[in-house]
Image (cartoon, rainbow, N blue to C red):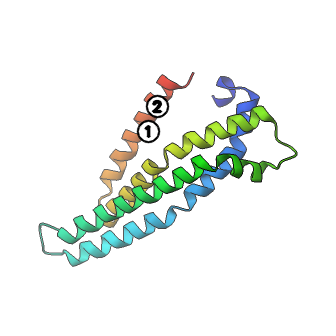
Amino acid sequence: TVGLLSGTVQQAALNPGVAITDYAALCMAFLYTGATNLVAAAREKDRGNDAKPITTSSFTTALQLSGYVGFMLGLTLFVFARQLLKSLIGNDSINIEVFSAAMKYVRIRALGMPASAVIGSAQAGCLGMQDIRSPLYVLVTAALVNLLGDLVFVR
């Protein structure tokens, strides 16, 4: 439906915009692995303790760190979107309309980086606690919120 609801300029802007934001998001993958390992190790230490203080603390720390890293990555993308796009597209071949649309795309995606980091770490932490249902509920909820946002904001 992207082709039906947008023009060729927006479609052309997706390629550099997606390349920058997706590669930047891959830089956060260490958070998810770390969260899984941290929470799983804490869960093992808390075995037999119903309060699970180490697991709770580890999970909270992983989410906080993810929020900070996601915020910094999003801020970096937002501030340096122009320079990143110029380095990817090249100075001689920049179409102003495509460049403007790509900047908008990168900056909008940058705003979502903190949420993306926290959701990814929360899912990883839940897997570390061997909770496979909570990530499913979170993903379904996120998909519904995304759909609602598309219906309201995308014209």
**Front in this rendered view, residue 1 or 37:** 37
User: In which quadrant of the rendered view does residue 41 lie?
Assistant: bottom left
User: Percent from the top left, x then y, of residue 26?
Assistant: 57, 59
Image-based side of 152 in relation to 4, left or right: left
User: In which quadrant of the rendered view does residue 42 lie?
Assistant: bottom left
Q: Which residue is mark 2?
A: 147
**Front in this rendered view, residue 151 or 73:** 73
Count of marks, rendered view: 2
Please tell me whether residue 4 is drawn above or below residue 16 in the rendered image: above
- Mark 1 Cα-neighbour bin, 10 Å: few <14, some 14–19, many ≥20: few
User: Percent from the top left, x then y, of residue 40?
Assistant: 31, 71
Q: Quadrant of the C terminus?
A: top right
What's the amino acid at mark 2? Leu
User: Percent from the top left, x then y, of residue 22?
Assistant: 60, 52
Label 2 element class: helix
Image point 51% across, 61% down: which residue? 28
Image-based side of 45 in relation to 22, left or right: left
Q: Are marks 2 and 1 in contact (CB under 8 Å)?
A: yes
Q: Which residue is mark 1?
A: 143
